Image: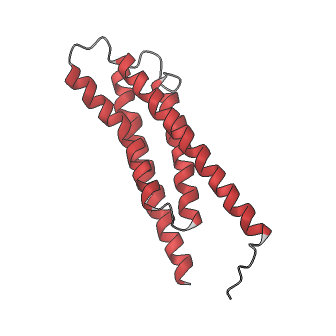
Amino acid sequence: MYRLRPLKPILLKKIFTLNLFRIIALAVWAIGAGISVNLTLYAGSANKSMLLVGLFLVWVLSPFVVILVAHARYRLGPATVRIAIYCLMLVITVVSLLGYSGRLSPTGARPAAVFLIVPLLLWVLMGIVIPVVLFRSRRKIKG
């Protein structure tokens, strides 16, 4: 009869810590995406073109959607990749909320510029961090 061996305490602590980090990152991600939608709709409330507001909304939400897709794709991947994705979830949320709330924008800047530049910067950040972490994790696996 096959007998199950108990997991080592260090492994259990690592699994628990990573799962807790995942839960926190996903919760912060969801709250950040919701607040970003509200701030985008508030900034575009004076605009008569619903199409333009809708396009801004898609652009603002795109980094949130991409990082969620990356999370789904690599949820069973190496721990370093998952940790990087969770950190990106937190960074995307914090940068988005700071940018869209006007905390990072210079005085007199047009609101539309912030809603264009922040997602672009987040795309660049994800485009650098995710491939680098994937490359490094594959290199560690190979030897």
Farthest residue to the bottom: give it: 1
Rendering quarter of residue 122: top left
51 and 115: which is toward the camera = 51
Position of 58 compared to 17: left or right? left
Task: Identify whether 25 is placed above or below 129.
Answer: above
Residue at x 47%, y 27% (from the top left corner): 35
From the viewer's perspective, is residue 68 above or below residue 141?
Answer: above
Instruction: Judge whether residue 110 can be spotted in this image.
Output: no
How many marks are shown on the rendered structure?
A: 0
Q: In this view of the protein, can residue 109 be seen by the observer?
A: yes
Q: Residue at x 47, y 66 (%)?
A: 134
Q: Residue at x 45, y 26 (%)?
A: 100
The answer to whether residue 87 is above or below residue 139 is: above
On the image, which quarter does residue 113 sit in? Answer: top left
Which one is nearer the viewer's eye here, 79 or 109?
79
Position in image of residue 141 (x %, y %): 54, 79
Where is residue 3? Give x, y as percent. Answer: 71, 83
Q: Residue furthest front?
A: 1
Q: State the residue lying farthest toward the top.
A: 46
Q: Where is residue 53 in the image (x, y as percent from the top left)?
A: 27, 23
The residue that appears at 69% across and 56% down in the rendered structure is: 17
Left/right of residue 137 with respect to residue 51 in the rendered view: right
Viewport quadrant of the C terminus: bottom right
According to the image, what is the colour scheme of the structure?
Answer: secondary structure
Q: In front here: 86 or 139?
A: 86
Q: Which residue lies furthest to the right in this view?
A: 9
Which image quadrant: the N terminus? Answer: bottom right
Q: Is 8 above or below relative to 108?
A: below
Measured as percent of width and height from the top left, residue 112 is found at 33, 23
Quadrant of the image occupied by residue 12: bottom right
